[in-house]
Image: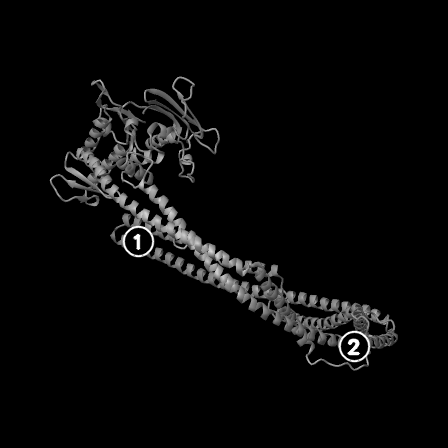
């Protein structure tokens, strides 16, 4: 089988096309550009999407087209010389890639016997799990795993040449049969053993239930006797309570009549007395009147105090020296106190002129005359200057005196005005206080007149506040007596009505008859009755339950017959169990022999490939039953475990093992393609070159002899190498088909 081209709307692929050639194809693309997506698409086109996967990492969700369109794809391939076109599409959202068709290319003729479920296994000869775990080799999947299907195919091919027989399946079938008979506490044998135990318990249980039933019936009889005694005593207490209820009813009737007479007498004495609310309002008005009288007294005291304060302020104002001057007059007097002004610069200038004249005369006169003129001029100038300075000092002193007098007058004026303002304010406060007291007196008189009018309506002879207080006190006392009598009458009436409604039904005992009193109190009887009923019910339930259990159980003869049948079946199953265990031991011995044959064969193929990849540095590879690897260097007798190899050598060994498995598992006549997804990413350049040379050689057609002795090309194995590096393409330039993806 050879893939010609693929076209995908799958994940990040938007109708992209990948054309392939026979042999080795190197697809170069950077990371996150769709290499793994093409690999997944190839598996999906061959085998379909896995239906049991769920969650966001399921292929149907992980590879949903980024554009939002339906998932679909096309693959053109060469199947043994015939060209096929495979189409998968999505018609229903819940079944992506569910639509399938396989036709001969260029026609609408379907390929017979090909379905979406069997396409991959028909073309490649292996199921999905084997193809994915052998032909698919990725960077993170180089490790060899012991997949059940892969192990079945390898061991079957190496041992018998057939794929439908394996040790694992046979062993598992026998183990299932063995476990079906006995597996820990489950299986047919433990079930039969438990059934025998159950039957023994059932027989023993029958005897225990019979004894328990007899004891329960005795407890039932005791509970019935106890309940009858308590009910008789309760009937005695019922008669006593009826008698007491009848006596209470008669007493309540008598009390109702007496209270009615009392209320009637009080109403006659009270006359047209107002109700309690009206009396309460009058009392509140009287209390308000008392508070108003106290307020009036305080207001009058305040008015007298304000009058005294006003007189004191007036006296202080009148005692001031400036009284009764007006503010304007005082301010004009202060403004009239103006200090004298300083003399101007005339005298100093005159002195200077004299000095200049003296100097001129000095220049014109003879020597003696010059001296005299100079002396006279200087004396005149000095006299003028001295006079000027004395005049300024006198004027300055006068100015200071005038300013001090004005300041004193302004301070007296300010104090005078403050006293005047205080006196006027005190007079105004006295006037207001007097007016407030007079207003309160008038209001108090109006309140007294109003309240007196209300009281005189039912007590005409009432006068003054004290008379009102006495009348209201007496009226409230009478009203309290009336209210208490009315309330007592209502309570008595309600009590009579209640007792009448709860009066016991006839026959009623004679109220005067003396009835016997039970030994137990009523509380004790009432408390004991529920317990007695519960005990009786519990006894009945226990008897019924035990009777039902006995009736539901099989008879003793039937249980014994079932025991015999179970013992016979148990003997048969135990014999079968022993035979199956013996067969499993024989099969295990045969499988150990098979593993001894299988491991060398796979190890030899792995060693052949590993030697080619390492240029002959290693010539032997060992594998145990769990497919753990170890390599033996050439010329060294001691094998080295995988953990002791370098990272590069370990990757080469894993790759060699995977390729060897492909050689042994994949059908040679199908030429199953190999897909490597960045499998060489961690190889250095030398190891990469060795691996590429091997893959190139593996992908080349080999000449095989025909029955006529001629040579013809064998089928070419197609290899797809996806890589994120350019070095693989550069190394195989012109020797392999190199594809660059954007």
Residue 207 seen in the current view: yes
Residue 344 point in image, percent of width and height: 43, 53
Give the left or right position of residue 305, taking residue 360 as reference: right
Rendered position, 70 above or below 653: above
The quarter of the picture where residue 269 lies is bottom right
Residue in front for this viewpoint, 596 or 654: 596
Name the quadrant of the N terminus: top left
Using the image as rendered, state which of residue 112 and residue 652 is in the foreground. Answer: 112
Picture quadrant of residue 394: bottom left
Q: Is residue 468 visible?
A: no
Q: Nearer the viewer, residue 669 or 143?
A: 669
Identify the residue at the far left of this view.
635
Whether residue 688 sits left or right of residue 70 in the image: it is: left
Camera-nearest label, 2 or 1: 2
Residue 373, which numbered label? 1
Residue 492, horizontal then vertical, whole percent: 80, 73
Q: Please, what secondary structure does the residue beneath circle 2 have? A: helix
Q: CA distance from mark 2 to mark 1?
A: 162 Å
Badge 1: residue crowd in 10 Å (few <14, some 14–19, many ≥20): many
Give the residue displayed 28% in from the left and 38% down from the top: 155
Q: Secondary structure at mark 1?
A: helix
Q: In which quadrant is the C terminus drawn?
A: top left
Label 2 packing within 10 angstroms: few (<14), some (14-19), many (20+): many
Q: Quadrant of residue 69?
A: top left
Find residue 137 and report its horizontal and vertical position in percent. Answer: 29, 35
Q: Nearer the viewer, residue 407 or 516?
A: 516
The residue under label 2 is: 243
**Residue 608's spot in the image, x, y percent?**
19, 34
């Amino acid at each position: 089988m050879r893939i010609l081209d693929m076209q995908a709307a799958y994940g990040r692929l938007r109708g992209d096309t990948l054309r392939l050639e026979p042999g080795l194809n190197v697809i170069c693309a950077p990371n996150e550009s769709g290499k793994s997506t093409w690999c997944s698409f190839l598996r999906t086109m061959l085998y379909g999407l896995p239906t049991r996967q769920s969650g966001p990492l399921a292929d149907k969700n992980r590879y949903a087209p980024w554009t939002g369109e339906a998932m679909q794809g096309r693959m053109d391939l060469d199947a043994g010389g015939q060209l096929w076109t495979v189409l998968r599409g999505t018609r229903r959202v819940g079944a992506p890639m569910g639509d399938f068709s396989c036709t001969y290319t260029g026609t609408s003729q379907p390929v017979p016997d090909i379905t979406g479920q069997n396409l991959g296994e028909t073309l490649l000869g292996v199921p999905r799990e084997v193809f994915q775990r052998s032909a698919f080799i990725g960077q993170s999947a180089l490790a060899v795993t012991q997949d059940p299907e892969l192990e079945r195919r390898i061991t079957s091919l190496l041992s018998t040449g057939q794929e439908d027989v394996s040790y694992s399946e046979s062993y598992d079938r026998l183990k299932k049969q063995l476990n079906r008979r006995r597996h820990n506490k489950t299986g047919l044998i433990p079930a039969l053993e438990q059934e025998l135990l159950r039957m023994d318990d059932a027989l023993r249980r029958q005897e225990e239930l019979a004894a328990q039933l007899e004891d329960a019936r005795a407890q039932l009889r005791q509970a019935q006797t106890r309940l009858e005694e308590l009910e008789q005593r309760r009937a005695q207490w019922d008669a006593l309570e009826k008698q007491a209820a009848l006596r209470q009813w008669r007493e309540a009737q008598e009390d109702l009549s007496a209270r009615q007479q009392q209320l009637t007498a009080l109403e006659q004495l009270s006359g047209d007395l107002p109700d309690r609310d009206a009396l309460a309002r009058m009392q509140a008005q009287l209390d308000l009147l008392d508070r108003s009288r106290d307020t009036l007294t305080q207001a009058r005291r305040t008015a007298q105090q304000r009058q005294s304060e006003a007189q004191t302020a007036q006296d202080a104002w009148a005692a001031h020296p400036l009284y009764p001057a007006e503010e304007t007059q005082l301010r004009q007097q202060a403004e009239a106190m103006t200090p004298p002004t300083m003399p101007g610069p005339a005298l100093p200038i005159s002195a200077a002129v004299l000095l200049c004249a003296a100097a001129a005369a000095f220049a014109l006169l003879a020597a003696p005359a010059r001296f005299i003129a100079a002396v006279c001029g200087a004396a005149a100038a000095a006299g003028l200057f001295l006079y000027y300075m004395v005049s300024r000092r006198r004027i300055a002193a006068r100015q200071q005196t005038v300013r001090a007098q004005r300041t004193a007058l302004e301070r007296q004026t300010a104090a005078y005005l403050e006293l005047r303002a205080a006196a006027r304010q005190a007079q105004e406060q006295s006037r207001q206080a007097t007016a407030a007291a007079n207003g309160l007196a008038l209001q108090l008189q109006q309140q007294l007149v109003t309240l007196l009018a209300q009281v005189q309506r039912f007590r005409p002879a009432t006068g003054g506040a004290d008379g009102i207080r006495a009348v209201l006190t007496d009226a409230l006392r009478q009203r309290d007596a009336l209210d208490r009598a009315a309330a007592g009458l209502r309570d008595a009436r309600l009590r009579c009505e209640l007792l009448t409604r709860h009066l016991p039904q006839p026959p009623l005992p004679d109220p005067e008859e003396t009835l016997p009193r039970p030994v137990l109190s009523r509380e004790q009887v009432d408390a004991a009755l529920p317990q007695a009923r519960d005990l009786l019910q519990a006894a009945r339930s226990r008897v019924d339950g035990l009777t039902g259990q006995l009736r539901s159980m099989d008879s003793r003869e039937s249980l014994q017959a079932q025991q015999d049948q179970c013992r016979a079946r148990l003997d048969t199953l135990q014999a079968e169990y022993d035979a199956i265990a013996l067969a499993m031991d024989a099969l295990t011995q045969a499988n150990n022999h098979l593993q001894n044959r299988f491991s060398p064969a796979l190890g030899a193929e792995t060693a052949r490939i590993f030697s080619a990849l390492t240029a002959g540095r290693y010539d032997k590879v060992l594998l145990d039953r769990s497919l753990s690897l170890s390599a033996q260097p050439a010329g060294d007798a001691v094998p080295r475990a995988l953990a002791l190899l370098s990272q590069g050598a370990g990757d080469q060994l894993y790759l060699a093992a995977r390729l060897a498995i492909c050689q042994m598992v994949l059908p040679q006549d199908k030429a199953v393609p190999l897909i490597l997804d960045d499998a060489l990413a961690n190889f250095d350049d030398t190891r990469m070159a060795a691996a590429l040379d091997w893959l190139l050689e593996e992908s080349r057609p080999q000449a095989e002899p025909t029955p006529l002795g001629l040579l013809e090309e064998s089928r070419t194995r197609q290899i797809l190498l996806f890589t994120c590096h350019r070095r693989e393409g550069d190394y195989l330039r012109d020797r392999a088909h190199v594809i660059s993806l954007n």
